[in-house]
Protein backbone atom coordinates (compact mmCIF):
# COMPACT_ATOMS: atom_id res chain seq x y z
CA UNK A 1 0.00 0.00 0.00
CA UNK A 2 3.01 2.33 0.14
CA UNK A 3 3.10 3.21 -3.56
CA UNK A 4 -0.60 4.38 -3.94
CA UNK A 5 -0.18 6.63 -0.88
CA UNK A 6 3.05 8.05 -2.32
CA UNK A 7 1.38 8.64 -5.69
CA UNK A 8 -1.55 10.46 -4.06
CA UNK A 9 0.88 12.58 -2.03
CA UNK A 10 2.93 13.44 -5.11
CA UNK A 11 -0.22 14.33 -7.07
CA UNK A 12 -1.34 16.64 -4.27
CA UNK A 13 2.04 18.38 -4.10
CA UNK A 14 2.15 18.85 -7.87
CA UNK A 15 -1.43 20.13 -7.89
CA UNK A 16 -0.61 22.74 -5.25
CA UNK A 17 2.54 23.87 -7.02
CA UNK A 18 1.16 24.26 -10.51
CA UNK A 19 -1.45 26.89 -9.56
CA UNK A 20 -0.35 30.40 -10.46
CA UNK A 21 -1.49 33.51 -8.67
CA UNK A 22 -3.99 34.11 -11.41
CA UNK A 23 -5.39 30.60 -11.11
CA UNK A 24 -3.83 29.34 -14.37
CA UNK A 25 -2.29 25.88 -14.52
CA UNK A 26 1.42 25.45 -15.33
CA UNK A 27 3.34 22.35 -16.43
CA UNK A 28 4.29 19.93 -13.61
CA UNK A 29 7.83 20.27 -12.26
CA UNK A 30 8.61 16.54 -12.00
CA UNK A 31 7.99 13.24 -13.67
CA UNK A 32 7.72 9.91 -11.85
CA UNK A 33 9.74 6.76 -12.57
CA UNK A 34 8.34 3.62 -10.98
CA UNK A 35 10.24 0.66 -9.64
CA UNK A 36 8.40 -1.55 -12.14
CA UNK A 37 9.86 0.52 -14.99
CA UNK A 38 13.35 -0.03 -13.59
CA UNK A 39 12.77 -3.79 -13.34
CA UNK A 40 11.32 -4.02 -16.87
CA UNK A 41 14.39 -2.27 -18.29
CA UNK A 42 16.79 -4.45 -16.29
CA UNK A 43 15.17 -7.74 -17.36
CA UNK A 44 15.73 -6.87 -21.03
CA UNK A 45 19.46 -7.54 -20.57
CA UNK A 46 19.36 -11.03 -19.05
CA UNK A 47 22.18 -13.10 -20.54
CA UNK A 48 24.37 -10.16 -21.55
CA UNK A 49 28.06 -10.79 -20.75
CA UNK A 50 29.97 -9.58 -17.70
CA UNK A 51 33.03 -7.37 -18.14
CA UNK A 52 35.15 -5.65 -15.52
CA UNK A 53 34.33 -2.03 -16.43
CA UNK A 54 31.51 -2.40 -18.98
CA UNK A 55 28.49 -0.11 -18.80
CA UNK A 56 26.61 -0.69 -22.08
CA UNK A 57 25.02 -3.59 -23.99
CA UNK A 58 27.65 -3.29 -26.74
CA UNK A 59 30.62 -3.97 -24.44
CA UNK A 60 28.95 -5.91 -21.61
CA UNK A 61 28.32 -4.91 -18.01
CA UNK A 62 30.15 -4.76 -14.72
CA UNK A 63 27.89 -5.04 -11.67
CA UNK A 64 27.63 -1.28 -11.13
CA UNK A 65 27.85 -0.55 -14.86
CA UNK A 66 24.66 -2.60 -15.36
CA UNK A 67 22.72 -0.93 -12.54
CA UNK A 68 23.85 2.55 -13.61
CA UNK A 69 22.94 1.89 -17.27
CA UNK A 70 19.43 0.71 -16.34
CA UNK A 71 18.78 3.79 -14.22
CA UNK A 72 20.28 6.21 -16.73
CA UNK A 73 18.09 4.64 -19.44
CA UNK A 74 15.14 5.79 -17.32
CA UNK A 75 16.46 9.33 -16.91
CA UNK A 76 18.02 8.90 -13.45
CA UNK A 77 21.78 9.73 -13.43
CA UNK A 78 22.89 7.03 -11.01
CA UNK A 79 26.74 7.07 -10.86
CA UNK A 80 28.68 4.08 -12.22
CA UNK A 81 30.80 3.93 -9.06
CA UNK A 82 29.78 1.64 -6.21
CA UNK A 83 30.44 4.09 -3.39
CA UNK A 84 28.87 7.06 -5.21
CA UNK A 85 25.82 4.94 -6.14
CA UNK A 86 25.33 3.88 -2.52
CA UNK A 87 25.40 7.52 -1.41
CA UNK A 88 23.11 8.68 -4.25
CA UNK A 89 19.73 8.01 -2.59
CA UNK A 90 18.25 7.44 0.89
CA UNK A 91 18.75 3.97 2.36
CA UNK A 92 15.78 1.64 2.81
CA UNK A 93 15.53 -1.22 5.35
CA UNK A 94 15.58 -4.83 4.20
CA UNK A 95 11.97 -5.47 5.24
CA UNK A 96 10.80 -2.49 3.15
CA UNK A 97 12.47 -3.49 -0.14
CA UNK A 98 10.44 -2.80 -3.29
CA UNK A 99 11.09 -3.76 -6.94
CA UNK A 100 13.58 -1.35 -8.48
CA UNK A 101 15.58 -0.74 -5.30
CA UNK A 102 19.37 -0.96 -5.61
CA UNK A 103 21.03 -3.63 -3.44
CA UNK A 104 24.62 -3.55 -2.19
CA UNK A 105 26.79 -6.45 -1.03
CA UNK A 106 30.14 -6.67 0.76
CA UNK A 107 33.14 -9.02 1.02
CA UNK A 108 32.48 -10.78 -2.30
CA UNK A 109 35.44 -10.34 -4.67
CA UNK A 110 37.32 -8.01 -2.32
CA UNK A 111 36.76 -6.80 1.29
CA UNK A 112 34.10 -4.14 1.82
CA UNK A 113 31.51 -2.86 -0.66
CA UNK A 114 32.04 -4.93 -3.81
CA UNK A 115 28.78 -5.85 -5.61
CA UNK A 116 25.35 -4.48 -6.51
CA UNK A 117 22.08 -5.49 -8.19
CA UNK A 118 18.44 -4.45 -8.70
CA UNK A 119 15.71 -5.97 -6.52
CA UNK A 120 12.82 -7.50 -8.51
CA UNK A 121 10.69 -8.81 -5.62
CA UNK A 122 10.19 -12.18 -3.92
CA UNK A 123 13.70 -12.23 -2.46
CA UNK A 124 15.26 -12.11 -5.94
CA UNK A 125 17.38 -9.56 -7.79
CA UNK A 126 18.93 -9.12 -11.23
CA UNK A 127 22.68 -8.48 -11.42
CA UNK A 128 25.77 -8.72 -13.62
CA UNK A 129 27.38 -11.44 -11.54
CA UNK A 130 30.63 -12.77 -13.05
CA UNK A 131 32.43 -13.84 -16.22
CA UNK A 132 30.82 -17.24 -16.70
CA UNK A 133 27.36 -15.98 -15.65
CA UNK A 134 26.75 -12.51 -17.07
CA UNK A 135 23.46 -10.77 -16.24
CA UNK A 136 21.31 -13.23 -14.26
CA UNK A 137 18.57 -13.39 -11.65
CA UNK A 138 19.85 -14.42 -8.21
CA UNK A 139 18.13 -15.17 -4.90
CA UNK A 140 19.06 -14.13 -1.37
CA UNK A 141 18.46 -17.68 -0.14
CA UNK A 142 18.18 -21.05 -1.82
CA UNK A 143 19.81 -19.89 -5.05
CA UNK A 144 20.52 -22.94 -7.28
CA UNK A 145 24.11 -21.75 -7.86
CA UNK A 146 25.00 -19.55 -4.90
CA UNK A 147 22.88 -21.04 -2.11
CA UNK A 148 22.49 -18.56 0.78
CA UNK A 149 25.62 -16.63 -0.20
CA UNK A 150 23.93 -13.31 -1.00
CA UNK A 151 21.97 -13.11 2.25
CA UNK A 152 25.21 -13.54 4.19
CA UNK A 153 26.91 -10.74 2.23
CA UNK A 154 24.04 -8.25 2.06
CA UNK A 155 25.11 -4.72 3.07
CA UNK A 156 22.15 -2.42 2.38
CA UNK A 157 19.87 -0.85 -0.22
CA UNK A 158 18.64 2.51 -1.48
CA UNK A 159 15.80 3.79 -3.68
CA UNK A 160 16.87 6.16 -6.49
CA UNK A 161 13.58 5.75 -8.41
CA UNK A 162 10.59 8.02 -7.82
CA UNK A 163 10.24 11.72 -8.56
CA UNK A 164 12.74 12.88 -11.20
CA UNK A 165 13.25 16.61 -11.78
CA UNK A 166 12.43 17.92 -15.25
CA UNK A 167 12.08 21.35 -16.82
CA UNK A 168 10.74 23.89 -14.33
CA UNK A 169 7.57 25.77 -15.30
CA UNK A 170 7.82 29.44 -16.18
CA UNK A 171 6.74 31.86 -13.46
CA UNK A 172 3.07 32.91 -13.67
CA UNK A 173 2.10 36.50 -14.42
CA UNK A 174 2.16 38.83 -11.43
CA UNK A 175 -0.98 40.68 -12.65
CA UNK A 176 -3.37 40.64 -15.61
CA UNK A 177 -1.83 43.85 -16.96
CA UNK A 178 1.77 42.61 -16.87
CA UNK A 179 3.31 41.78 -20.23
CA UNK A 180 3.46 38.05 -21.03
CA UNK A 181 5.81 38.36 -24.00
CA UNK A 182 9.03 38.12 -22.00
CA UNK A 183 10.26 34.81 -23.39
CA UNK A 184 13.95 34.44 -22.66
CA UNK A 185 16.50 32.22 -24.34
CA UNK A 186 17.62 29.30 -22.14
CA UNK A 187 20.74 30.03 -20.14
CA UNK A 188 23.67 27.90 -21.33
CA UNK A 189 26.50 26.91 -19.07
CA UNK A 190 29.81 28.42 -20.07
CA UNK A 191 32.33 25.87 -21.29
CA UNK A 192 35.14 25.24 -18.77
CA UNK A 193 38.34 27.17 -19.42
CA UNK A 194 41.19 24.79 -20.26
CA UNK A 195 44.73 25.72 -19.30
CA UNK A 196 47.61 26.07 -21.71
CA UNK A 197 49.80 23.03 -22.23
CA UNK A 198 50.47 20.07 -24.51
CA UNK A 199 47.48 17.86 -25.32
CA UNK A 200 47.36 14.08 -25.09
CA UNK A 201 44.79 11.40 -25.86
CA UNK A 202 43.61 8.59 -23.59
CA UNK A 203 44.70 5.36 -25.26
CA UNK A 204 42.99 2.78 -23.03
CA UNK A 205 39.34 1.85 -22.52
CA UNK A 206 39.07 3.47 -19.07
CA UNK A 207 41.84 5.52 -17.48
CA UNK A 208 41.52 6.18 -13.74
CA UNK A 209 41.92 9.83 -12.76
CA UNK A 210 43.26 9.87 -9.20
CA UNK A 211 43.56 12.41 -6.39
CA UNK A 212 47.31 11.79 -6.01
CA UNK A 213 50.11 10.18 -8.05
CA UNK A 214 49.77 6.70 -6.61
CA UNK A 215 47.87 3.53 -7.41
CA UNK A 216 46.44 3.82 -3.91
CA UNK A 217 45.11 7.33 -4.59
CA UNK A 218 41.34 7.85 -4.57
CA UNK A 219 39.74 7.65 -8.03
CA UNK A 220 38.01 10.94 -8.87
CA UNK A 221 36.69 9.93 -12.30
CA UNK A 222 37.42 7.72 -15.33
CA UNK A 223 38.50 9.08 -18.72
CA UNK A 224 37.19 7.20 -21.79
CA UNK A 225 39.34 6.05 -24.70
CA UNK A 226 39.96 8.93 -27.12
CA UNK A 227 39.33 11.67 -24.55
CA UNK A 228 41.66 14.69 -24.84
CA UNK A 229 43.50 15.97 -21.76
CA UNK A 230 45.87 18.86 -21.02
CA UNK A 231 49.25 17.87 -19.59
CA UNK A 232 50.22 20.23 -16.76
CA UNK A 233 52.81 18.57 -14.55
CA UNK A 234 54.78 15.34 -14.23
CA UNK A 235 55.84 13.25 -11.24
CA UNK A 236 57.78 10.04 -11.96
CA UNK A 237 55.46 8.00 -14.22
CA UNK A 238 52.37 10.11 -13.42
CA UNK A 239 50.89 13.17 -15.17
CA UNK A 240 48.77 15.91 -13.60
CA UNK A 241 46.11 16.62 -16.24
CA UNK A 242 43.02 18.70 -16.87
CA UNK A 243 40.05 16.93 -18.42
CA UNK A 244 37.65 18.39 -20.99
CA UNK A 245 35.15 18.87 -18.16
CA UNK A 246 37.62 21.21 -16.46
CA UNK A 247 38.41 18.80 -13.61
CA UNK A 248 41.97 17.91 -12.61
CA UNK A 249 43.68 14.72 -11.49
CA UNK A 250 46.65 12.36 -11.76
CA UNK A 251 46.81 9.65 -14.44
CA UNK A 252 49.31 6.89 -15.15
CA UNK A 253 51.24 7.96 -18.24
CA UNK A 254 51.12 4.49 -19.84
CA UNK A 255 47.45 5.17 -20.60
CA UNK A 256 48.17 8.34 -22.62
CA UNK A 257 49.35 8.92 -26.17
CA UNK A 258 50.70 12.15 -27.66
CA UNK A 259 53.79 14.27 -28.22
CA UNK A 260 53.79 15.80 -24.77
CA UNK A 261 53.63 12.49 -22.92
CA UNK A 262 56.84 11.49 -21.11
CA UNK A 263 57.61 7.87 -20.43
CA UNK A 264 59.29 6.63 -17.29
CA UNK A 265 61.42 4.20 -19.23
CA UNK A 266 62.22 3.31 -22.81
CA UNK A 267 59.94 0.70 -24.38
CA UNK A 268 61.04 -2.89 -24.14
CA UNK A 269 62.43 -4.69 -27.16
CA UNK A 270 59.48 -7.00 -27.62
CA UNK A 271 60.55 -8.88 -30.74
CA UNK A 272 61.57 -11.99 -28.79
CA UNK A 273 58.91 -11.89 -26.08
CA UNK A 274 56.17 -14.55 -26.19
CA UNK A 275 52.72 -13.28 -27.10
CA UNK A 276 49.27 -14.49 -26.13
CA UNK A 277 45.70 -13.16 -26.01
CA UNK A 278 43.24 -12.33 -23.24
CA UNK A 279 40.34 -14.81 -23.10
CA UNK A 280 37.79 -12.90 -20.96
CA UNK A 281 35.74 -9.76 -21.48
CA UNK A 282 37.69 -7.62 -18.99
CA UNK A 283 40.83 -8.77 -17.20
CA UNK A 284 42.07 -6.73 -14.23
CA UNK A 285 45.78 -5.86 -14.41
CA UNK A 286 47.20 -5.53 -10.89
CA UNK A 287 50.26 -3.68 -9.58
CA UNK A 288 51.42 -6.84 -7.77
CA UNK A 289 50.66 -10.58 -8.10
CA UNK A 290 47.81 -10.46 -5.59
CA UNK A 291 44.04 -10.24 -6.08
CA UNK A 292 43.91 -7.44 -3.47
CA UNK A 293 46.68 -5.37 -5.12
CA UNK A 294 45.68 -2.05 -6.77
CA UNK A 295 44.26 -2.32 -10.30
CA UNK A 296 46.36 -0.46 -12.90
CA UNK A 297 44.15 -0.98 -15.92
CA UNK A 298 41.98 -3.57 -17.70
CA UNK A 299 42.83 -5.82 -20.65
CA UNK A 300 40.03 -6.85 -23.00
CA UNK A 301 39.04 -10.05 -24.78
CA UNK A 302 41.35 -11.00 -27.68
CA UNK A 303 43.81 -8.21 -26.84
CA UNK A 304 47.40 -9.27 -27.61
CA UNK A 305 49.82 -9.03 -24.67
CA UNK A 306 53.51 -9.85 -24.21
CA UNK A 307 54.56 -12.20 -21.40
CA UNK A 308 57.35 -10.85 -19.19
CA UNK A 309 57.66 -13.29 -16.29
CA UNK A 310 55.71 -15.65 -14.07
CA UNK A 311 55.14 -15.94 -10.34
CA UNK A 312 53.10 -18.94 -9.21
CA UNK A 313 49.66 -18.58 -10.91
CA UNK A 314 50.31 -14.98 -11.98
CA UNK A 315 51.95 -13.57 -15.10
CA UNK A 316 53.42 -10.11 -15.60
CA UNK A 317 52.34 -8.76 -18.98
CA UNK A 318 53.10 -5.84 -21.27
CA UNK A 319 50.04 -4.30 -22.93
CA UNK A 320 50.07 -2.60 -26.35
CA UNK A 321 49.78 0.83 -24.69
CA UNK A 322 52.98 0.22 -22.68
CA UNK A 323 51.32 -0.54 -19.36
CA UNK A 324 52.77 -3.44 -17.36
CA UNK A 325 51.15 -5.40 -14.57
CA UNK A 326 50.14 -8.78 -13.17
CA UNK A 327 47.18 -10.93 -14.22
CA UNK A 328 45.89 -14.37 -13.21
CA UNK A 329 47.37 -16.53 -15.97
CA UNK A 330 44.36 -18.83 -16.34
CA UNK A 331 42.66 -15.96 -18.24
CA UNK A 332 45.39 -15.92 -20.89
CA UNK A 333 45.14 -18.15 -23.96
CA UNK A 334 47.22 -21.31 -23.65
CA UNK A 335 48.41 -20.60 -20.12
CA UNK A 336 46.18 -23.05 -18.27
CA UNK A 337 48.03 -26.01 -19.83
CA UNK A 338 51.48 -24.43 -19.85
CA UNK A 339 52.48 -25.35 -16.32
CA UNK A 340 56.19 -26.03 -16.15
CA UNK A 341 56.68 -25.36 -19.87
CA UNK A 342 59.12 -22.96 -21.45
CA UNK A 343 57.50 -20.42 -23.77
CA UNK A 344 60.26 -18.67 -25.66
CA UNK A 345 62.66 -15.86 -24.70
CA UNK A 346 63.47 -17.60 -21.43
CA UNK A 347 59.88 -17.33 -20.15
CA UNK A 348 59.37 -20.30 -17.86
CA UNK A 349 56.33 -21.17 -15.82
CA UNK A 350 57.02 -21.26 -12.12
CA UNK A 351 56.33 -24.51 -10.35
CA UNK A 352 52.88 -24.96 -8.86
CA UNK A 353 52.32 -22.90 -5.74
CA UNK A 354 50.63 -25.84 -4.11
CA UNK A 355 53.63 -28.08 -4.72
CA UNK A 356 55.69 -26.06 -2.23
CA UNK A 357 52.94 -25.40 0.28
CA UNK A 358 50.56 -28.35 0.53
CA UNK A 359 51.09 -31.91 1.70
CA UNK A 360 48.96 -35.01 1.59
CA UNK A 361 47.91 -34.44 5.21
CA UNK A 362 44.75 -32.38 5.77
CA UNK A 363 45.27 -29.05 7.56
CA UNK A 364 43.36 -25.90 8.47
CA UNK A 365 43.66 -22.76 6.34
CA UNK A 366 41.71 -19.67 5.28
CA UNK A 367 40.81 -17.85 2.04
CA UNK A 368 42.60 -14.63 1.08
CA UNK A 369 39.84 -13.44 -1.30
CA UNK A 370 36.25 -14.13 -2.26
CA UNK A 371 36.32 -17.22 -4.50
CA UNK A 372 34.02 -19.59 -6.35
CA UNK A 373 33.81 -23.18 -5.17
CA UNK A 374 33.85 -25.60 -8.12
CA UNK A 375 32.64 -29.19 -8.38
CA UNK A 376 35.89 -30.21 -10.09
CA UNK A 377 39.37 -28.67 -10.42
CA UNK A 378 39.01 -26.22 -13.32
CA UNK A 379 37.51 -22.83 -14.16
CA UNK A 380 34.95 -24.43 -16.46
CA UNK A 381 33.70 -26.87 -13.83
CA UNK A 382 30.22 -26.22 -12.36
CA UNK A 383 30.15 -23.63 -9.57
CA UNK A 384 28.79 -25.02 -6.29
CA UNK A 385 28.74 -21.65 -4.56
CA UNK A 386 30.81 -18.70 -3.38
CA UNK A 387 33.10 -18.44 -0.36
CA UNK A 388 33.96 -15.11 1.27
CA UNK A 389 37.31 -13.54 2.11
CA UNK A 390 38.67 -14.91 5.41
CA UNK A 391 36.54 -18.09 5.41
CA UNK A 392 38.14 -20.90 7.45
CA UNK A 393 38.53 -24.17 5.55
CA UNK A 394 40.20 -27.56 5.81
CA UNK A 395 42.49 -28.47 2.92
CA UNK A 396 42.04 -32.13 1.94
CA UNK A 397 44.31 -32.60 -1.09
CA UNK A 398 45.81 -30.86 -4.10
CA UNK A 399 45.16 -31.37 -7.81
CA UNK A 400 47.59 -29.28 -9.83
CA UNK A 401 46.89 -25.63 -8.98
CA UNK A 402 43.60 -26.53 -7.28
CA UNK A 403 42.87 -27.82 -3.79
CA UNK A 404 39.95 -29.83 -2.51
CA UNK A 405 38.62 -28.17 0.63
CA UNK A 406 35.95 -28.77 3.26
CA UNK A 407 33.96 -25.92 4.83
CA UNK A 408 32.53 -25.83 8.36
CA UNK A 409 29.09 -26.58 6.92
CA UNK A 410 30.48 -29.87 5.60
CA UNK A 411 30.37 -28.75 1.97
CA UNK A 412 33.30 -29.97 -0.13
CA UNK A 413 34.63 -28.48 -3.37
CA UNK A 414 37.65 -27.19 -5.26
CA UNK A 415 39.18 -23.69 -5.06
CA UNK A 416 42.24 -22.11 -6.67
CA UNK A 417 45.28 -22.77 -4.48
CA UNK A 418 46.45 -19.18 -5.02
CA UNK A 419 43.82 -17.91 -2.58
CA UNK A 420 44.49 -20.40 0.23
CA UNK A 421 46.79 -19.67 3.16
CA UNK A 422 47.55 -21.52 6.38
Image (cartoon, helix red, strand yellow):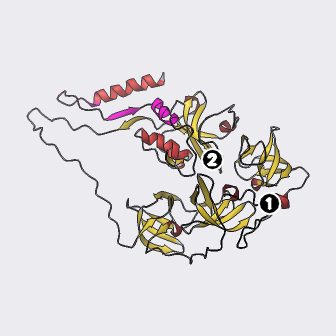
Q: Secondary structure at mark 1?
A: helix
Q: Is residue 264 magenta?
A: no
Residue occupying image coordinates x 63% and y 42%: 133
Q: Nearer the viewer, mark 2 or mark 1?
A: 2
Asked if labels 1 and 2 touch by Cβ distance under 8 angstroms, the answer is no
Q: Which mark is residue 300?
A: none
Residue 1: % across, % down: 48, 21
Q: Which residue is tagged 2?
A: 131
The residue closer to the viewer here, 122 or 157, is 122
**Residue span colored magenta:** 17-46
Q: Which residue is tagged 1?
A: 353
Residue occupying image coordinates x 52% and y 75%: 263
Residue 49: % across, % down: 57, 44
- 135 versus 10 height, above or below: below
Residue 177: % across, % down: 8, 34
Q: Quadrant of residue 139?
A: top right
Q: Residues within 10 Å of mark 1 (few under 14, many from 20)?
A: some
- 150 versus 396 height, above or below: above
The residue closer to the viewer here, 224 or 174, is 224
Among numbered discs 2 and 1, the one appearing first in the sequence:
2
Q: Quadrant of residue 264?
A: bottom right
Residue occupying image coordinates x 57% and y 67%: 323
Q: Secondary structure at mark 2?
A: loop
Amino acid sequence: MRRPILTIGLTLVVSLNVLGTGGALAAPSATYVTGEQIVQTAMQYLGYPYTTVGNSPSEGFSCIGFVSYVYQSNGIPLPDNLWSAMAYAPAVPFDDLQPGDVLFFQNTVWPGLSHTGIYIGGGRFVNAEWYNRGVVVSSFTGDPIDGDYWEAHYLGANRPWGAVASAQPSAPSASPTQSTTTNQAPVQEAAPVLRQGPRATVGVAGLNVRARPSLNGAIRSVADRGARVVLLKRYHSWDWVQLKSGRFGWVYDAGLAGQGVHRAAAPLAVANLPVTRVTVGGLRVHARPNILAPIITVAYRRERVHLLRSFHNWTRILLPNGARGWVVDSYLAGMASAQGATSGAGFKRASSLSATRFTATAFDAHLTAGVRVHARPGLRAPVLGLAAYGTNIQVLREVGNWVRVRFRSGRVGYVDALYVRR
